[in-house]
């Protein structure tokens, strides 16, 4: 039997991120751009209305109020708020102008057939459009100037991992020497994956330049990390590339992209926060009673904290209510729980059967380590039969491209409890990969609702 992986945490903790998250900053900039656009349209039409009509009208900014929702909707589809718009003010101004022009045309079409054009002032509408276009272009030019001054030349984090391959000429990229750090793409070593995962943290694009013999391993690591990953190469092989990037002096194969775009991640995070906060408030009495019962039984700690692998193959500390005796706690997870497990306490058996022991993971959701719905995080030493999970199927690491979940598709299908056979692991893995490939917000909501029906489960022990 393989010995479960287990090392002291101090030896496996990866370094801090190489760069702050520019994605979060970009989201704030996009929101600011939306607010600026609203102010510009209201200001442009307001100034024109004031200059032409004074304050005699009772329907102030009527045209602008009708135009705004159309413009903002079209602007989202015209990439008015995009990375390229932050880099190139001319592109940003052009896309904003196209969105405003299309919105104006659609509005005129609607009001013409609704026979409400008499309520419009042609001078105010034309002048308001002209002023708004000028101010939109000026705001985009100022924004790009300010961002270059405040952020530098790049609005994205690009990482080049130099692992012995051909040179990569990419200005403003963050560079890491894989041999000096060291970074080894070894799927059998979670500590090595954790170090690589921390290097990739907050990166928008990761380029690995490595020898031919290591390209398959690096491609697997990039796919599992859930990042846009590229392998520098001069020839095609069995990397399953999804695109080709051609730049000055070098080429790379795109072998991975994150499973969710930024908007999808924002929606998923908002869903997580809403559900986690609501569930914590509703479950406060259960939290208090469970903590009291655990303390009264043996006086030990209320929570059990276990290191597990999360998104990007990075370690995090997962919280549960303690269900085992203190001296029997299995931090590596080498032994699966069973119905007659002699390690569990009386309170522990009850909270396991009712899934109450999982409630503290709502703290992990609020902290951003976990999601409400996603692949369940497994203990590092978990085994199916006599093999560690990742030894059974090489696709195992791909499930870490999303945040782990409190519940998931595998759980509502009944794939939980002990993994006595390899099939128990492959069933869960198939469900996890299916969930990642077909994610939707509606799907998350349905999984949460169906979880309520399997909280008490015959394999919950």
Image (spheres, rainbow, N blue to C red):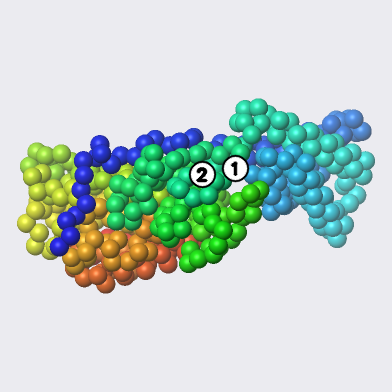
Secondary structure under the numbered disc 2 in the rendered image: strand
Q: Residue furthest bottom?
A: 423
The residue closer to the viewer here, 95 or 422, is 422
The residue closer to the viewer here, 366 or 124, is 366
**Residue 130's spot in the image, x, y percent?**
87, 39
Residue name at image x 17 percent, y 56 percent: 3
Residue name at image x 61 percent, y 39 percent: 171
Res 127 → quadrant: top right
Mark 2 residue crowding within 10 angstroms, few (<14) / some (14–19) / many (20+): many
Q: Relative to 142, is 158 on the left or the right? A: left
Disc 1 to disc 2, how far (Cα)?
A: 8 Å
Q: Mark 1 = which residue?
A: 170
The residue closer to the viewer here, 33 or 200, is 200
Can residue 370 be seen in the rendering of this structure? no
Mark sitting on residue 160: 2
Residue name at image x 51 percent, y 54 percent: 231
Res 327 → quadrant: top left
Res 454 → quadrant: bottom left
**Residue 140's spot in the image, x, y percent?**
74, 36
Secondary structure under the numbered disc 1 in the rendered image: loop
* Vertical comparison of 60 with 223: above or below: above
**Residue 21's spot in the image, x, y percent?**
50, 38
Viewport quadrant of the N terminus: bottom left
Residue name at image x 54 percent, y 64 percent: 236
**Residue 311's spot in the image, x, y percent?**
39, 50
């Amino acid at each position: 039997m393989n010995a479960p992986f287990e090392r002291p945490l101090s030896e496996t903790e990866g370094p801090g991120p190489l760069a702050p998250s520019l994605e979060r900053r970009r989201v704030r900039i996009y929101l600011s751009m939306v607010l600026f656009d609203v102010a510009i349209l209201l200001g442009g039409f307001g100034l024109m209305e004031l200059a032409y009509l004074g304050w005699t009208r009772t329907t102030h900014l009527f045209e602008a109020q009708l135009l705004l929702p159309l413009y903002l909707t079209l602007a989202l589809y015209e990439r008015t708020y995009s990375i390229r718009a932050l880099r190139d003010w001319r592109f940003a101004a052009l896309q904003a102008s196209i969105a405003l022009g299309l919105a104006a045309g659609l509005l005129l079409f609607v009001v013409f057939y609704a026979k409400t054009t008499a309520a419009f002032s042609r001078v105010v509408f034309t002048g308001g459009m002209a002023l708004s276009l000028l101010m939109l272009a000026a705001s985009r030019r100022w924004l790009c100037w300010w961002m270059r001054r405040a952020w530098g030349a790049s609005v994205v984090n690009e990482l080049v991992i130099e692992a012995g391959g051909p040179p990569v000429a990419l200005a403003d990229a963050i560079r890491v020497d894989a041999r000096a750090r060291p970074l080894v793409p070894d799927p059998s070593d979670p500590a090595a994956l954790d170090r690589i995962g921390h290097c990739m943290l907050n990166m928008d694009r990761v380029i690995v330049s490595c020898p031919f013999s290591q390209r398959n391993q690096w491609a697997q690591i990039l796919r599992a990390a859930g990042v846009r990953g590229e392998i520098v190469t001069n020839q095609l092989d069995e990397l399953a590339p999804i695109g080709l990037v051609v730049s000055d002096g070098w080429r790379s194969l795109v072998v991975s992209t994150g499973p969710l775009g930024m908007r999808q991640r924002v929606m998923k995070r908002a869903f997580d926060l809403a559900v986690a906060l609501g569930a914590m408030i509703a479950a406060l009495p259960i939290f208090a009673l469970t903590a009291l019962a655990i303390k009264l039984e043996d006086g030990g700690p209320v929570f059990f904290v276990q290191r597990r692998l999360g998104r990007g193959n990075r370690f995090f500390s997962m919280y549960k209510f303690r269900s085992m005796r203190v001296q029997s706690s299995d931090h590596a997870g080498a032994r699966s729980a069973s119905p007659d497990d002699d390690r569990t306490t009386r309170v522990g058996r009850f909270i396991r059967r009712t899934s109450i022991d999982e409630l503290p993971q709502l703290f992990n959701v609020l902290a951003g380590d976990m999601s409400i719905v996603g692949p369940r995080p497994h203990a590092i030493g978990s085994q199916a039969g006599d093999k560690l999970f990742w030894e059974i199927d090489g696709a195992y690491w791909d499930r870490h491209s999303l945040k782990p979940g409190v519940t998931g598709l595998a759980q509502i299908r009944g794939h939980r409890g002990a993994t006595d056979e390899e099939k128990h692991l492959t069933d869960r893995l198939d469900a996890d990969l299916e969930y990642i490939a077909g994610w939707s917000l509606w799907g998350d909501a349905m999984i949460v609702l169906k979880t309520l029906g399997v909280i008490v489960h015959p394999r919950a022990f």
